[in-house]
Image (tube, rainbow, N blue to C red):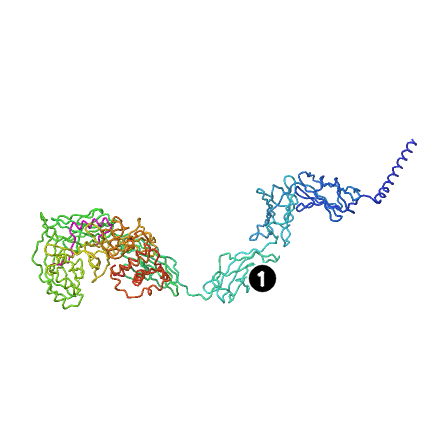
Amino acid sequence: MRSYLHKISVVFLLLCLIISIVPALVQTTSAIPGTGPVITDVSIVSNHAGDSTKAMIGDTITLSFTTDEPVTKLGSFKINGSNPDTFTNVGNRYTATHLVDSGDPVTGAPATFQINVKNAAGIFSLTVEATTDGSTVTIIGKQPVITDVSIASNHAGDATKATIGDTITLSFTTDEPVTKLGNFKINGSNPDTFTNVGNRYTATHLVDSGDPVTGAPATFQINVKNAAGIFSLTVEATTDGSTVTIIGKQPVITDVSIASNHAGDATKATIGDTITLSFTADEPVTKLGSFKINGSNPDTFTNVGNRYTATHLVDSGDPVTGVPATFQINVKNAAGIFSLTVEATTDGSSVTIIGEQPVPSPVITSHPSDATVDEGGSTTFSVTASHATSYQWQVNTGLGFTNISDDAPYSGVTTTTLTITGATADLNGYVYQVIASGGVLPEATSNSAILTVNSAPEAPTIVSAVAGDAKVSLTWNLVDGSTSYKIYNSTTPNNFGAAAATVDGSVNSSDVTGLVNGTTYYFVVKAVKGNMESTNSNEVSAIPTTVPTAPTESPSIQEPINTGVIVLVNGKAENLGTATTATVRNQIVTIVTIDQKKLEDKLAAESQGAVITIPVNTKSDAAVGEFNGQLVKYMEQKQAVVEIKTEKATYTMPAQQINIDSLSKQFGENVALQDIKIQIEIAAPLADTMQVVETAAVKGEFTIVVPPLHFTVRAIYGDITKEVSTFNAYVERTIAIPDGVDPNKITTGVVIQEDGTVRHVPTKIVIVDGKYYAKVSSLTNSTYAIVLHSLEFKDVAQHWAKDAVNNMGSRMVIGGIGNDQFNPDQDITRAEFAAIVVRGLGLPLNNGAAAFSDVGTSDWSSSAINTAYSYQLINGFEDGTFRPNDRITREQAMVIIAKAMMITELNAKLSVHAPDLMLRSYTDAADASNWALTSIADVLQAGIVSGRSSTILAPQANITRAEVAAVMERLLQKSGLI
């Protein structure tokens, strides 16, 4: 046993000896020259965003160390089990890097490394596997990325502040689903809620007494992890810079109002007035320096309990803005916490800084409204206005607004209510407005209101009354909208009882039977539309008589009615002729034959241009003035004018227009003027002519307002008769408008030729001795009628040329393009212009051979172009063409109009001026062709054509349809023809 213990003791002593010797040996070896390099200052880091102690795929790990001598790395040098991607040095400081990839294990522990190097002598260093400074890098998976971080509060009026009871909301977005960690905090507290919608997360925190009032933004730490358990970086700042500061309880301001002590109006203030701003606070407060009234510190700041009042005395420094004065209520409580800034009143009160108040101008507060009334009824237009002291109602009848006088049908024209009593159809479409005036300008003009008159039917016109055996056959024109017609007869003029008959509205003729032959009967017709009746038609008379079995064409000459006919020479009554009455073709004809010797003696005593008036006051169907050719020749030399005057019309004939020399040659060279009879006649048309007239009226869609008359000048030699059908100048026919016919219902006169062709002739309404007449000017003889042909084009309602277009359309001078359209701004062709000028002048159409090579006889414009050529209105081009479809320029049109002025004799009224004098105000006058200058100057001087502006004539521009309508209207007006 002792031996065994001895052995053990020996072994133990040997081991102790070895242990004590080995360290000494090691220390001795390292100090020996030729040993390996020494590695010091070892550290490891990652370039991982936000945390250099972590690395994930794509991050780079950097291992750095220092040696005591230059070295190179060995193959066993590893970073996380891989050779370094780079190995560099700066002096004895060495750096090795490793790019983390999918081969790096995610261990959750620090990455490993082995530093193995050797020196120039080939001696190896010891292997180093730990950092000197304790740094480590852990390989992790992908971290959640946090973006779009914002923070806000539900604090009233300011989301950047929060006080006790407010909720702070922290919002952010992640690139993958996450859950929050325990160190996720808002202002040091765990969130009260944590929710998400997709990858948008929201955390909330209810501020309570535990939240410190720091005066700095509330803090937060966003810490989340993904499904793999990898933590995000901690985020402590917002992306958009938003912050929320925890504040104490703010004073609450309520019941804010503002008022002025301005006399009579607390909403206004001027210099010297005081503005008072009042409000209530829920705790005692003091005002801050930013408390302002209209940009100034309050003059006073007082309170009664929690009701505070600040005042401001308005002075010259207050701007007169015309808008309410501004204010900013800023106060703080005893804890030094500021209220929200209040800049608006609770009750909507305001105070406007004003200067010296002017007298207000009138203001329309209620405008008149459109009104509708039945013809004969009454209606009103009313207006209300403030600051108005007087009123003036105006009416626009189509020529602009004019003041209304207090005459029927108007009353109250200077009050707030205009009354119209007994509305007539011609008021339909009139537009009304009122001018309200006050102490100062401007006056106030109301909106316009339109009057619509539901018109009674127009009065029909009886166009024929043919006597028969115990009956009279009446024919009248149809009236638009009529449902029936009532026929009245009486043996006393203008005295009618009940209707003798009623016929349907589609019927325009009726026989009145049961009459007594030989008795004169008078007739009128009324049109009926619903409950309204027209006024009486024109009154006609007829004497029923037994009709002979076979009428004779030869006249039955009776004894002279009056051998001493009174004729007027320059208005002086003279017994110069005899009258004879005969019945020809069922017409009573009165012929007044003028004594040659007596009239020549009278004319010898008169100056040139004497007027010879032959009144025929009998009830004849035809009135004839008869002269022998020698007397006519003498009258021609004396430039005398003959008037045949009946109760229906006056025919004015200058003796020169008879052209007796030309007439006599038609009978032979040796015929004595003494043997030729010249007759000037006004007659009612024969029955067959009346049928042509009635048919033409239906076809032409016009209404005959005044019964037609036939005008004739004829020369008789033996049994040969020659008619004078055309004249070298306009000859006037003045046709009486029967009582009861509204002259406003007349649009023009027309010529109705034997074949039913209708053409316009220039016509104007005149008043002579208080009676209305239609003065018709024409270059021909034929049957003439006065008609109504109202026409309005829809597309010119707002056009500058509206009135001219509708006037010329109603006069049958221009036509539309269909569907009540006119297309006013379209260019017009040369053919169209020629046709309009011919129609406007009332020229008879020439249906002869075409005057130009490019105008065929079958062309629609052929006869109009021929007529224009025969009257020397147009010449065409040098190549013999007219080019009818070319657009006509303004200067070409002006040349034609200047020639038309010669026909109307308007050119004779112009003064002589050099063309350049008339054109000098136009900057483009040089654009006008030399051949057109004189004509352009004439139409400018006459006022028929004007420039397109005060400085632009535009002679080479095409003329439009609207311009043509205006030009034709002015030509006829300036010539005195309409």
In this rendering, position of residue 681 left or right of residue 928: left
> For this rendering, which residue is in front, 2 or 670?
670
Question: Residue 115 location, x and y as percent?
Answer: 75, 42
Q: Amino acid at mark 1?
A: Gly
Q: Quadrant of residue 15?
A: top right
Choose between 64 and 327: the one closer to the eye: 64
Please state which of residues 300 and 295 is positioned toward the viewer in this rendering.
295
Vertical position of residue 594 compared to residue 182: above or below:
below
Give yes or no for residue 683 being in the magenta stretch. Answer: yes
* Along the line of sight, the residue nearer the viewer: 645 or 123: 123
Q: Is residue 746 visible?
A: no
Query: Which residues are drawn in magenta?
Result: 676-705
Say above or below: 465 vs 946: above
Residue denoted by label 1: 289
Describe residue 712's horizontal placement relative to residue 241 as left or right.
Answer: left
Instruction: Give the residue furthest to the left.
Output: 559
Instruction: Report the side of 225 relative to 422 (left or right).
Output: right
Residue 579: quadrant of the picture: bottom left
